Amino acid sequence: MELESILLPGIENNRPLVIAGPCSAESEEQVLSTARLLAGKGLKIFRAGIWKPRTKPGGFEGIGVEGLSWLKTVKKETGMYVATEVATAKHVYEALKQGMDILWVGARTTANPFAVQEIADALQGVNIPVLVKNPVNPDLDLWIGALERINNAGLKRLGAIHRGFSSYDKKIYRNLPQWHIPIELRRRLPNLPIFCDPSHIGGKRELIAPLSQQAMDLNFDGLIIESHCNPDKAWSDASQQITPDVLDYILNLLVIRKETQTTENLSELRNQIDKCDNTLIEILAKRMRVAREIGTYKKEHDMTILQTGRYNEILDKRGSQGALCGMDADFIKKVFEAIHEESVRQQMEIINK
């Protein structure tokens, strides 16, 4: 993709670029009060949802077009740039008509190529920064596909927002971070700015600070954080919003590390990693040769490939061994699940010959 800078005039190219504001625009007073407080903290970009897609009907689904005029007032009064989410071509037309500076595409919309194409068509010929959230499901190609659709419409000022992925098993987070997915996005599209949305990943205000730090440690370019003048009274997602004072405190505590290191010590450590990786590949190749021999034995003795008892034994034992060596047991299980999958594939080739 051909990309250009998303930076707007007057905004410095420093990490993190922060976009902040309430989940939803609720009233003109709430929008302006929050914006004034954020502007007083030095924030340059104000966000607020005007149209809010809800999981179930009956909840607050946004104030609608009326709220765009409030954002326009924010821009005029504070000098902040203003951003909002669009999900349809009509949203795009209304947002552009009211002079929005940045648009973003939500996770539910990204998951629907027809909806993304509709937005892309509506944006044809417009030079405006557009940020695309990851789809609700962990599908990197779907995420990249949405970015490509908008890029193909002629828009070059694109960015991505990592807001985590939905899961039936929520555990700590509202949406699981699955950091490896945005890391792979960065590998494939190295010039694409990536923002982290710790509000939606965490779902709880106390998780915003650690998630923001993790994003910075992974070299994300920016943060988009929900901030409300009175979070406990918010009409939507109250538990994940923070006051401008708390936001300022979190941002001031962030440690922004350098992207690159050129010290000799680091080079030597990386050489050790390379040697370990080469050894791992050699050991895996040897293991696969043994797996193929087992496949031949199973074929000769008319045995099924999958031996569930043995598979469970491997996962349990290797997880425990990994924990004893200072590694997470779940991580080791995932590694051996992938190894087992490849072993089964190779044995299938043997049996089907």
Image (tube, rainbow, N blue to C red):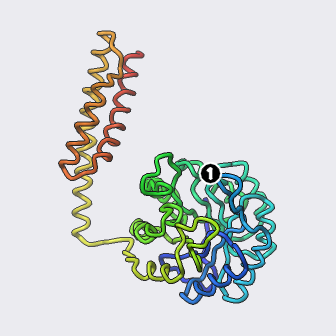
Location of residue 237 with respect to 330 vertically, above or below: below
Q: Which of the 4 quarters of the picture holds residue 209?
A: bottom left
Please state which of residues 199 and 91 is positioned toward the viewer in this rendering. 199
Name the one closer to the observer, 92 or 240: 240
Instruction: Judge the density around disc 1: few (<14), some (14-19), many (≥20) Cα neighbours within 10 Å.
Output: some
Left or right, residue 34 beside residue 41: right
Counting the numbered discs, the total is 1
Name the residue tied to disc 1.
145
Whether residue 111 sits left or right of residue 264 in the image: it is right
Residue 146, x across and y down, in percent: 64, 54
- The three-letter amino acid code for the residue at tag 1 is Gly
Q: Residue at x 66, y 69 (%)?
A: 24
Residue at x 61% of width, y 71% of height:
234
Name the spot of residue 303 as percent of width and height, x first. Answer: 33, 13
Name the residue nearer the viewer: 324 or 27.
Answer: 27
> Position of 213 compared to 196: left or right?
left
Across and down, in percent, residue 325 comes to 18, 49
Towards the viewer: 195 or 276: 195
Residue lying furthest top? 301
Residue depicted at x 63% and y 57%:
147
Q: Quadrant of the N terminus?
A: bottom right
- Residue 328 x %, y %: 28, 50
Above or below, 272 against 262 in this view is: above
